[in-house]
Image (cartoon, rainbow, N blue to C red):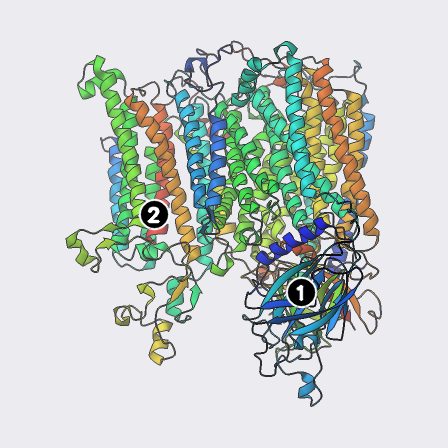
Amino acid sequence: MGIASAAFESLWNEYVLWSALVGGFTFIWMAHHSLTYRSKDGDDDWVDVDGIEVGVFPKHNDNITLELAWTIIPFILIVYLTWISWGPINDVWADPSDPASQYGLDCTDPAADSNKCHHVIDITAQQWFWSFDCGELGPSLCDSSQYQDLNGTTVPVLSLKEGEFYLANLTSLDVTHAPWFVEFGVKEDAVPGLDTQVWIIPTCEQADCGGEEGESTLLLCTEYCGDDHAYMAAIVNVHK
Amino acid sequence: MSDDHDHDYDHHPSPWGPHDWSHGAPHNSFAPLVMSIGIGIFLYALASVFVGGEVANLGALSGVMLGIIVITIGLLIWWRQDMSFDGTYEPKATGAPFRNIDLRKIAMWVFLMSEMMVFTSLFSTYIRYRLGIPNCEEVFLSGEWIEGTSVVCFEPAAHLIASSWFHLAPGAANTFALIISSFTIVLALKTAKMSNKKYADRYEVELSDVHSHRSRKVAMFLGSTLFLATLFLTLKMIEWFVGFPTPGPLTELNHGHSEIASLYSEGYTIHASAYQHHAYDTAYHGGHEIPHDSALYSMMQAGTHPGGIMMADIRVGASTFFVTTGTHGMHVLGGMIGLSYMTFKGLRGGYGPSNAVSIEYFGLYWHFVDLVWVLVFPFFYLF
Amino acid sequence: MKQNSLARILVLLIVLGLALSVAPQADSLPNGIIGQSEKGCTCHGAVPDAGVTPSIEGLPTTFNASTTYTLTISFSGGPSGQAAEPHNLGGFNLATSSGILEAVDDTVKIEGDQATHNGIDDDLDGNGLQDAIEAGGEAIISGNDYTSWLVNWTSPSSGSSTFTLAVNSVNGDGKASADDAWNLMSVTVAGPSTGAAVEELQSADPFVVLVTLIFVSGILLAAVILYTFYRVSPDGFNWESFAPWITEWLTSTDHKKVGTLYFLAGFFFLGVGGIMAMLIRIQLAVPGNDFLTQDQYNQFFTMHGTTMIFLAAMPLINGFANWLIPLQIGAHDLALPRINAMSFWLQPVGAILIFTGVFSGQAADTGWTGYAPYIVSETAHSGTTMWVAGQIMLVASSTLTGINFLTTICSMRAPGMGWMQMPLFTWSIFVANLMLFISIPAWGVGLIQVYLDRTIGTAFYHVASGGDPLLWSHLFWYFGHPEVYVVILPAFGVISEVLSTSARRSVFGYRSMVYAMAGIGIVAFIVYGHHMFTSGMSPTLRFVTMLSTMLVAVPTGIKIFNWLKTMHKGSLVYRTHTLWALGFLVTFTLGGISGMFFPSLAMDTHLHETYFVVAHFHYVFVGGTVFGMFAAVYYWFPKMSGRMMDEKWGLLHFLTAFVSYNGIFWPMHKLGVLGMARRHHTWFITTDDYTNIPAEMASWNMFITVSAFIFFFSNFILVGNMVKTIVSGEKAPADPWGGWSFEWMTSSPPPTPSFDPHNPPVLHDANEHVATEPTIFGQWFESLMMPEDETEGIH
Amino acid sequence: MAHYTILGKDPYWMNFWGLMILTAIEVGAVGVELGDTITMSILIGIAIPKFIMIAAIFMHLYGDADSKILTMTALFPAFFIIVMVFFIGLTSPGAATELPAWCRPGYWT
């Protein structure tokens, strides 16, 4: 199962690496100390290093160098992780009015670069299904006229073309919903009374993108919206 | 804390009161249990009376009353235990930072911290909506409306209230009422706090008469505070719902209306999804009210806007107004409940130099309520 | 098709009735009716329109077994046929509880086991004229060009059959129009009366299960109380001695008694929340399960979250705080004992309000976050109002608790105990209460707004009037994020105490521990936006909170490393509470690390609202708070009860619970990344790889459910251990573990008063006191305070 | 209790009349048409001294032995109040794509 966006993939790998390092370091340390420095209950041969006695605040057991070390080193790691997390913000939140952004301008805009431009579609959410509106886009770029059965529920199918950039305007007619393009790793809330947007970059897992039929992926609702929340799904079809 | 009066742990006072304070704080009380049950009944019944803005079951009002009665019983138990409090048990703080300050005073200040956050939340709500929703006046002047279709906009109550002295009168009177009540309660404190000797000199009474003389005076000041608080809520009800007849000579000034119109009668309510007001009527005063530099004016001159009365959905603006001032009003109500107990206790000679701080600590709350009004008044009534 | 029992039909009818009342706003789509599910169809206007009349003809009053009937479905009324070229007239969906539906011609198709019109959309330009006609060809016959259709129905062999028909009447413009209307009808036909019908075994309604279990737990609790009463004094087992005993408990303001009451409430609701978790896990064990309907599932996860956080974790923490804070700081009681009792009693009454919905089957179904506008919408259950009311009482309770603990800790410490000599548990309770106290008014105000919206009809969250749903999210998370630290910080305090005592060292870096906790307390208020990264919150604020959220890891890291270093050169004694503390270190570190994935925006857009989040917060709530509380139970139970707990049972409890716990939540990380969304009542696996969750999820979910049951039952070992200890435990000495703070000074259990009032405890300090000039800050601070020799108090 | 006097008079009495006068000015300022900005400045300009007068004299945050530490207590929530007003009161919802340029990578390099 191909996961999410390229941005997600690289961040994920980096984070998992650091998680493993930090976690491994902590657990090895813990295992070592808890096995090395132990004694049996009832043994009297332990040394009372800090003068523990009821009603007496024990001796301080500190080391300012060490404490500063594990304040500063994690802080540096945090700064690094923040830095690498900052970069991909433009992948998920690019500014559609900025011609320099990686998704360019709206393709219908006369000023747009035809090699780097995006298409705008509308997604409307309501309890409990999605409606897609491809606007003026032709069926090869975007098609929303099909419906398909998904586990006993008829859901709409959104067909998109691989390699194109899509900007979806989200609106909700009743309560808050959120389309989650499971394979593209993006979601954004559709809030009633508010216009939000989400970038969709369709990707395929197979080289031929499922051939004629295209490759189908799942869209789920990920902001709790009432009874049939779990059935509020759609199929996203990606083709060459 | 004072070591003179240790807890006597073999002492088992009745959980219904009264309490013997020389044995320390109450060790048993039914008040918490009873009051909690009362609050539960109250909230449950209230939600049965109203559902989604409509009266669903008026019969449940009896439940609301029952809840209030149970809460009152709980309060009475609480007060019965407190009535005998004469200052013999007054623990003080040890150590930094509140060294030597009465615990009750610290607790009251800590409580006020949470009250500050309550009103900050309400003000944040107000600021967010006031800035986030287009103002009705601006919408009106922009001409982006058409008669007969409601537009969503934020109508500050101040726009209505500050438009006429008659609308402003109850709110302005309330401001003075609260300030005077703040003054009367510090007078009560001052009177209660004065040593017997000083009191006798000051008011030229015999030392033996000081107690009864002082009791009357303290009760008078506390009673005045209670009266002013009652006046505050009465005026509030007049302003919200009831209205008030204007005396004859003033009717002329009030555009010929024979009463101070309440917000309710003006249509300014939480349900006002189609609010209409002469301020948003292009025909009002023959259209002289419309500023000539506004878009609406130019549109009407050009004949692209037919004019008429703008209809507005002002529910959010009205909700913030009524709930914020209402929360303040509930605090006044809470103060009144406390004051009625204190007045009663003062009448019975319950306050003297040894426990006058009780009045001060209640006063902290009362002044805080006044402080909040200092902010609520300009932001909700004037601007 | 599944066999439907009578109960299922009834449930279906109820749900359909509900669906009628809650049917949503929706377009009328060119294809007519889509999106039908077993509870009806969800594809029309806001409310059913009585102007549209559906009908089914051809049904017998009593059907014969296995006979085929031809049914004529039709409707009249509505905007149908108003378009210039009448096509796209409407559609239908017919469901039957038993028997088989078949299409007679191409105008009808069978979807699942339901019949619907065969919609062909041939009007891509939406001008109301078929493209085929425009192109000069023949009109294409489409199922939604009719107002009546034919369907064959083959009856089952026995039982009765309920038909549910939804029709919609559209104006044919192929667009969503305000006048598109729909309606719904339902009819039941009796089956053959010959032969004794075999009663099917009916599965119990999960609600009945839950309510029964809650009552059984309540009765058990009462039985335990009676048993305790009996054991304390077998001769005095009569009303005359019972009445004052129970009165004492109902009216007591003593911090130890109130603490015990908090424990009883906390453990009771921990059990109730656990039962709900088990029902949820049964539902999720297999794909496409229908053990719970979505309606029930939504209530259960809402109540599970609410119960666990507000009615289980918080009372347990308050139980320890009540018991231990006065003992640890050497005070005779809390500052305001009666207010303390009030804090407690508001909780059970609030809990009853929250649960009123459960007993009526209409509990809140909003999630514990209760997002607007769903929470004020009419689709939310009626019990939501009571949920809000109960929470308002809990807010009041927490505020009173805050006043009490802040005042107590600030001003009632024994002589010699400065701020930097306070036990770390006291510090943790102080910081936690400060955070709770400052943050909870925001939520209280939000709750009152919602309560008023739902009752008297204010419009704070009514989107149509300009209400802003995000305001609720802001107010909720302004409180909600500090709140999650409020429940974890006391666990930090417990672990500090337990680890240092067990390692027979003083805790490493006491001061940095305190600063780290204070730092967490401050940072908590400026990070809450990370819960709203995918909402429509101000993007600038999303960015700012991304940066600040990253910072939380620093103080948390300091604490973890300090705990590890505490063991260095110590003499760690393995007792049950030590094991739980070490277990806490493992799980909390894992939970902390997984938390680092969320502030990274590009990852959060994928991980938000998935099982990865569920895994993360259960790792910190259960692996953090609950494990911390378990350590605290084993650590302080001897002090409270005066008897030692059984270490063997404790070890068994730790091993089973720790292993099964990780079995529950570790796989959830994977589930989340692979595409399992949170708060979904069901999930599917089919042969189609791409549109479904991968097949391996089925095994993982079953594994999780089994682990969950083991975890649930393993905790009865603890309950058993506690009962066993009270009844027949070994007597505990004053200081069984070798701790230094004041609670170990008094006997176990402590007398009342805990310390001799004529000889109050004084804290000594083993560190050499170096007399130095106070710093400028110290001098300034000293100048703020009342003079040392002020004996008169304030005038 | 106050241990000081204002201009030789009882501080409570002086404070009371000061507040009455300020409030009268406040109400008067709204009655006279002065334009929004001036009205707002007057309202804020008067609310602040009123606020301080009530807190300092009626609530005894001035002139008592415990005044300083209690003032600090009263000011403690200031940080949290500012955070709340900024985060809740002064932000407005928007689409993520509206992220301002200064929050984007590359802007600073």
Instruction: Give the letter of the chain under mark 2.
Output: B
The residue beneath circle 2 is B377
Query: Could you say where residue A234 lies in the image, as x and y percent from the top left?
Result: 71, 63
Does A108 appear above or below D107?
below
Badge 2 crowding class, 10 Å Cα cut-off, few under 14, some 14 to 19, many 20 or more, is: many
As shown in the figure, which amino acid type bears the numbered disc 2?
Phe
Tell me the quarter of the picture where residue C94 sits. bottom right
The residue beneath circle 1 is A199
- The residue nearer to you, when weighing C446 against C206, is C206
Q: In this orientation, does residue C208 appear?
A: yes
* Residue located 36% across and 56% down the image: B268
Query: Could you say where residue B4 lies in the image, as x and y percent from the top left?
Result: 44, 10
As shown in the figure, which amino acid type bears the numbered disc 1?
Trp
Query: Could you say where residue B172 lies in the image, as x and y percent from the top left?
Result: 27, 47
Does B201 appear above or below C284?
above
Q: In which quadrant of the rendered image does the C terminus of chain B lie? A: bottom left
Q: Residue furthest bottom?
A: C136
